[in-house]
Image: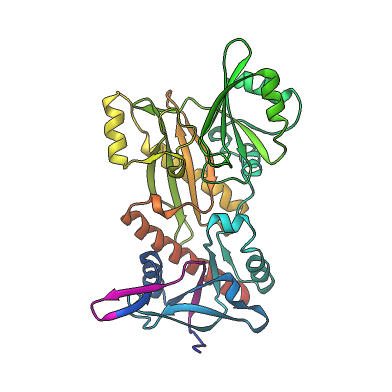
Amino acid sequence: MRMGISGICLGVATTVVPRRRLQARGMIDRPSLYYCRMAHFAAQWGATLILFNPEHVRWSRNIVEAWSPADLRHPYGNWQKARQRLPDIIYENVFVHLAVQGYAHELRQQAAIRGIPLFNPGLPNKWRTSLWLSNSEVSHFIPPAVKMAHGIGSIRRIRKWGTAYLKPVGGYGGMGVTRIETLPKGQYRLATDRARSGNRWRRVVGESQLQTWLDTHDGHFMLQQGLPLLTLNGRKVDFRVVVQRGVEGQWHRVGIVPKIAAVDGVVTNLVAGGERLSLEQCLVLAAREGKSIPIEELTTAALQIAQVISRRYPMTGLLGYDMGITEDGGIWMIETNPKPARSLLTDEMRRQSALYSAGFSVYLARKATVRARA
């Protein structure tokens, strides 16, 4: 049992545990490089990083079974599991599908009771986020959207827009997103890349059939206006823009990752048939077609939206946006991801992300200490 960590203790709540690895000096237990980097950067500010599963906290005793470097000076070496005191700050980093299922609910509840800052808790669902951002100073970046309701109003909206996207308000990974395109003679084309059944489908329906189908989708769905997104080689492109706050509490761009949909693709998610491009590849493809990618404008928009979100949700320190550029140069924020996948990022982007995650955790812990002493 190793108790009594001195200085700031940063806790990462995750189900990803260290695994056995072979190094030059033999077998060790070590987590992914991301967490080793976080521990390395945390140590530079005199902080210790621990990893723990939310189910392994004994709240009644204020202790947790957690992993930390066996030698705090060498976070890339062996890690060991021991009982630790509760951390001063918790970075909630459970997988998004587990968070949606409520896996971190007790963690959030108990942290609030004890006054432990919780870095990057979940944001409201897609509809609620879209609604309040549409009424903020960044409304010009937010595509028009309405919450699903029964009746002819939804079809009128689709006809007005020409193209609409039906989205689950709590969805992720492109699951259940359907594109609805208005065709001549009262017909509509529906397309889904990733249905609940696991199948990709396309169909053309009449207005009465569309109404019947829409009536099966209740308030757990929203309609968002379709945008004439930039295309490269005839395939639609959007951009994952990741921003984070650092040790001084300010927002920074971590990276921009272009994603290109499959031919006739509905979404650009990799699990739904999309592909990742490097920014360099994207710029070359765009130049060949006489198109440009406004990198600085994308960055500015992402940082402005982040400022608005963090004013309302101060513990937010990491955001991944799916940003769109229309053929006429307009910039839009299609969707906000409070738990963006690191797998999209380059190694250098992941290093920067680890630096900012550790830094912002230290920032929050220091602020909590100041408040406690006041």
Query: Is residue 268 visible to us here?
Result: yes
Q: In the orientation shown, which residue stands out farthest toward the top? A: 185
Q: Where in the figure is residue 130, as x and y percent of width and height?
A: 62, 40
Q: What type of secondary structure mainly makes up the magenta span?
A: strand
Image quarter for residue 156? top right
For the question of whether residue 374 can be seen, the reply is no
Residue at the image point whose x is 58% and y is 11% from the top: 184
Q: Quadrant of the C terminus?
A: bottom right
Q: Is residue 308 above or below residue 285?
A: below
Q: Is residue 270 above or below residue 248?
A: above
Q: Residue at x 47, y 40 (%)?
A: 272
Q: Which residues are magenta?
A: 7-26
In this rendering, position of residue 119 left or right of residue 75: right
Quadrant of residue 114 in the image? bottom right
**Considering depth in this image, is 92 or 217 the residue closer to the camera?**
217
Q: Nearer the viewer, residue 347 or 315?
A: 347
Residue 70 image offset from top left, x and y in percent: 39, 83
- Let me know if residue 23 is in the magenta part: yes
Residue found farthest to the right? 151
In x, y percent, where is residue 353? 40, 58
The residue shown at (38%, 40%) is: 275
Residue 302: x percent and y percent?
47, 43
Q: Could you tell whether 13 is left or right of 36 in the image?
A: right
Picture quarter containing residue 106? bottom right
Specify whether 337 is left or right of 129: left
